[in-house]
Structures are given as structure tokens and as C-alpha cells.
Image (cartoon, helix red, strand yellow):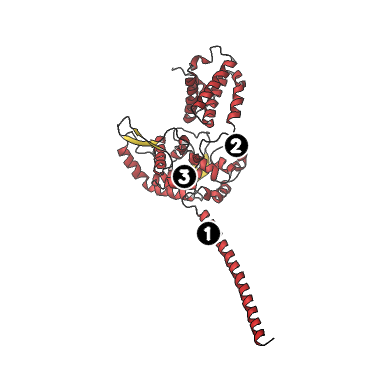
Amino acid sequence: MEKKDLIEEFLDKKLLTAKSTRRCYRVNIEKYFRLLDKDINTYLKNGNTLEDYESDLRRVYLMLQEQRKGLLSIRTVFTGVKQFMVTHDKELKDLDFWELLKNRTKGAEPASDSAIFNTGSIKEILSHGNACSRAMFLMLASSGRRIGEILALLPSDVNTDVSPATINIKKTVNGNTTKTGQKTLCFISDEALSAYKTWMKERDEYLRISLKRGNHEKDANDPRVFPMSYHNALIIWRNLLMKANLVEIENFKDKYTGKMNRRIKREHKGERTLSHPHCLRRFYRSYLGDADLAEYLMGHGTILTKTYRRMRPEDLAEKYRKLMQNVTIFENTSKDVEELRKSDKEKDERIKELETKLANIENLLGLKKQMEELIKNGK
């Protein structure tokens, strides 16, 4: 039996099962020891003092700052490192560095305001897409779910017979469960439902063509709504971003084909945040209009979402329907109606103002006529 490395043992102890989560922890822990240039297998067994650990943590923190890493990125690195170190030695939980790090990264925000798209920017992006991309990303934007969860959907998971339409989230594309291990229900907007129906008419032909073009073996009987890999979905999103000119672009030489190609410029402001469709999840959380409801429908279980866990599905559907226009991209009629109402109100006020002026003028004309009559009669 192959012996597990220390990181693998740590991940198992923490009961972390999601592949993406395990990969994230591993990358950050390995980065820490790579910057330290020390062996992970002997580091916690070589007689270091608490002061030695403090010194190393501070040194890596300063190195990450020199690399101009954002506070959120730095905090993510040390979150994994802290849990790894504490798992092996409980005393390391009391290092002063952790409190210092907490204070330094408190309230950390994304490096760029453009990391959150609004309705207009998402509309600009999806205007360059086809039936597949429009359906996939409208479902993401109006449900707040993860891309892996949407890619794992089967047609039977989408209920088009209710309003608003619902989707049952059972697992992610690379695993047998969701990230939280829970099966949840959420809603999609009417326009997302319409895009979904359009896509389903084209889906089989898409799969047939992709089987011919693909360099990798694909399943001709793939039953999923979107029969593609996680990697392909990312490529589709990034191509849309480049077509919409919302990211910086650079040319590069493909090492396999030798041809020049384009890609999103690496390490530019907001690149990591924007170039992943997860930013649609942030859009949903920011714009739905009810933060606690958004958290619940996104699959988060917090104290503030308890109320929604006790509500009947039809009541949740009604609450979502009232807010649905806030996460509707193309058919956002509520804003248009509001503008029309505002315009009508202004017109009504203007008409009333003119009627008042006309009445005043008529009164003045009446007085003038009376004065003329009095003068004519010599009175």
C-alpha cells in the first residue's frame, strides 16, 4: 500500500472530501514550504521553537507582499498553512502571528471593483455567446450556484412545469456530492428557463459534433444538460470575456502547435477573479436583493438562513419571484416599467402645471375683458 504524504494525511484528518478543496489546500501548503525552501517532511520534527515558526511565517508573509499578492490571496494561503501546522502540533494555534494576520487582512476586499459584474456587463458578455453559453451562464447568474453543480445537472433535475422553474442540486461534476454534501433546491429566472429550452433543442447536435471534433474521448451517451468538462466551460467563459473586451489580452505561442494565440493577460488586476464564472455567483449574492435568501438558495447553511429552511417551497418561490428581475439580464422589464412609470409621472406633473398656468391665463383674460367693458361703458 502506497504511503500517504503529510498533506494527504492532514486532509483526511480534516475530513475534506471535495477534490477542489483538497487541491486548494495542497497548493497553498506546498507554496508556503516552497517559499521557505524547507522540507515539509522534516519541518515539524526538527526541534523548531515557537519563535522559529513565528519568524518563518512573517518571512513568507513579507515575500507574498513583495510579489504584490492581494490580502485575500495571502489570507487564503495562511488559512491552509495554519490548519496544517495546528493539526500536527496544537501549540502552534497560539502563535501571535495568527492574530496579527487576522488584523492585517480584516475586511479584505477583491483587488478590483471590476471583480463584480453588474447586469450590463453580463449582458455584454453573453451577447457574444451561443445557445449553450447563454443557457449555462444565465442559469448560473440567476441561481447563484457553482459551475460544477450546473455541469452535473441532468434534464430530470430541471423542473420546467413550475414557476419559477427549479433545479435540484445533487452533486458536482467531479464528485458524487456537492461541496457541502447537501442536496438542495434553487430557482432560475424565466429568461434562464427560456434559454434552457432553446439549448435543449440543440444539445444533441452539439454532442454529435463535439464527438467528431474532440481530441479526448467523450461519452456519446452523456446524459447531462451540458455534456462538457469543467475545463471546457472555463474556456467558453474566458473566450466570451475576451470578445467583450472586458479583460486585458496577450498573445502567446502555443507550445504544442507553435501557433500564436490569445489569452487573458496573466496577473493583471482582477484577472483571477474575472476569468472564472464563479464571479456570477458573487453577482447573484450582491444583486438578488435579499442577502439571507441568496445565501440559502446558494447552498450556504448559516444561522441567518434558518428561517428559510423552515419555509414551504411555494413560499420560497414567491419570495424569489418578487426579486427575480434583479438577476435577470436580458429581459429585465421591471427597470423599463419603472422608467416608464417615472416618465409618466413627470408628464402628469407637467400637464398639471400647464393646466394651472392655463387657468391663470384664462382668469387674467376674463379680468381683462371685464376691464374693457367697464371702460367702454364709462364706468
In percent of width and height, residue 253 lies at 33, 32
Whole-percent x, y for residue 67 in the image = 48, 27
CB of mark 1 within 8 Å of CB of mark 3? Answer: no
Give the numbered dot on residue 340.
Answer: 1
Q: Residue lying furthest bottom in this view?
A: 377
Q: In the rendering, which numbered label is found on residue 139?
A: 3
Task: State the residue at coordinates (54%, 56%).
Answer: 338
Please tell me the numbered disc located at residue 302.
2
The quadrant of the image that shows the C terminus is bottom right
**Residues under numbered marks 3 and 2 in contact, where contact means CB atoms less than 8 Å apart:** no
User: Residue at (48%, 22%) from the top-left corner?
Assistant: 30
Dot 1 and dot 2 residues touching (CB under 8 Å): no
In the displayed structure, 68 sits above or below 112; it is: above
Q: Earlier along the polypeptide chain: callout 3 or callout 2?
A: 3
x and y percent of residue 263 in the render? 38, 36
Distance, label 3 to label 2, CA atoms, is 24 Å
Question: Mark 1 or mark 3, which has the lower sequence index?
Answer: 3
Which quarter of the image is occupied by the N terminus?
top left
Under mark 1, the amino acid is Leu
Residue drawn at x 60%, y 72% as measured from the top left: 358
**Which residue ends up furthest to the top in the rendered image?**
47
Q: How many marks?
A: 3
The secondary element bearing badge 2 is classed as loop
Residue closest to the eye, 355 or 72: 355
Amino acid type, callout 3:
Met
